[in-house]
Amino acid sequence: AKWDDPPNTNVALADAGIPGSLPRLNPECVGIAARAILGLNGKVQKQSSFDRKHYFYSDQPLGFQITQQRSPIGRGGKVSLGHNEGLDYTKDIRIHQLQLEQDTAKSVHDVYPGYVLTDLNRAGVALLEIVSEPDIETPEEAALYVRKMQTLLRHIRVSHCNMEEGSMRCDVNVSVYRNSDHRLSGTRCELKNLNSLKVIRGAVSAEIRRQIETIESGNPVEQETRGFDARQGKTFVIRSKEDAPDYRYMPEPDIPEIHLTDEWIEAARLALPELPEVALARIQEQYGLSKETVETILAEPGCVDLFEDTARGRNAKTVASWITSEVFGQLSYRAQRLQDSTLTSGQLSGLIDALETKSVTSAQAKKLLIAYMNGETQS
């Protein structure tokens, strides 16, 4: 199912909770999960299994979610923040675990006032959940962590991680504590479905203020799931938050355990591309590009290959400029990803060569680019 497909047009029987239908694990998802945890310098578990997490809500027709609470496919790893991210200190955000689970349906709140509609298109689609340790201490750290995670997962081709389309979603647990108390002593509230870095900063800041005001007024902070109203700059209650025992976890009987060999895991490790931090330093040094330009190239899956293939024997800054301005401009106009574009490095190379030898004007070169990205092979 695509994010913009009409509601309820891509629904499997099992995901709609039809009796007698059974779920099935997509093997490709196991490889993607392994790639993600290895990219985070974590450890792929040779044996993992699935659980049922029971709860009753309109976005889950089955009455439970298939997840990996007890025996996830990945554990450990970290995301390092520091000077490259604009901080004046360094900090590691540790990864607790990485698990495969079943996505829920989409709840639509803004079509008919007073009604919540349910779109089952994404129900049952494999979801990769990455759970961090409670190491994040400020709204800025939260946003930087998500941004760096987004860059990594795009670069190693785990996901497009487009937050506006929902291919990357963030839930943030927030708690505050008095200086005299243990740092994890506060009651936590979960902020759901934060869909941009700006929203993450705003939501976390608003929730911190709300909890402090609640405590200072002499009232306890209730454990809740909350949303964020960006227009008012406030969080609001969605539902009371259940503790883990209330979910009544039980082993999933319909999906067998995953067993991976050392050889399979090593092959997945060897297939990993150069990681973003390594690529950032190498491309900056090798091609003399600015940090900001390289970060822009790294953020788009497939762009490093396009850049390096095109820059071979050419002015790297000219190539980078064409990619980050003209090519990205066309992608934005078309709401398209580079991986889905018909543009090749050979076409871009020929276009830049023609421009350098003055065989075409700048305006003609831009028209050629549009033709290539329209799927035309000759011009």
Image (cartoon, helix red, strand yellow):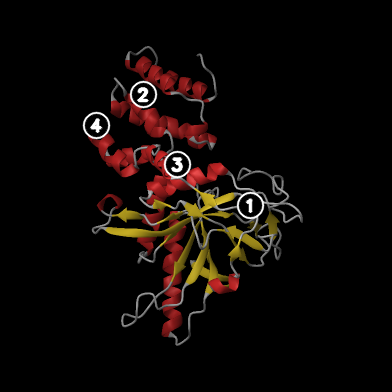
Disc number lying in front (1 or 2): 1
Name the image quarter holding residue 181: bottom left
| First along the sequence among labels 1 and 4 | 1
Residue at the extreme bottom of the image, as rendered: 218
Which label sits on residue 139? none
Query: Please, is residue 139 above or below residue 29 in the view?
Result: below
Q: CA distance from mark 4 to mark 3?
A: 33 Å
186 relative to 245 in the view: left or right = left
Query: Which residue position holds label 2?
Result: 310
- Seen from the viewer's position, the closer of residues 40 and 318 is 40
Mark 2: which amino acid? Thr
Mark 1: which amino acid? Gly
Q: Residue at x 34, y 42 (%)?
A: 276
| First along the sequence among labels 3 and 2 | 3
Q: Residue at x 25, y 52 (%)?
A: 83
Camera sees residue 82:
yes
Name the image quarter holding residue 114: bottom right
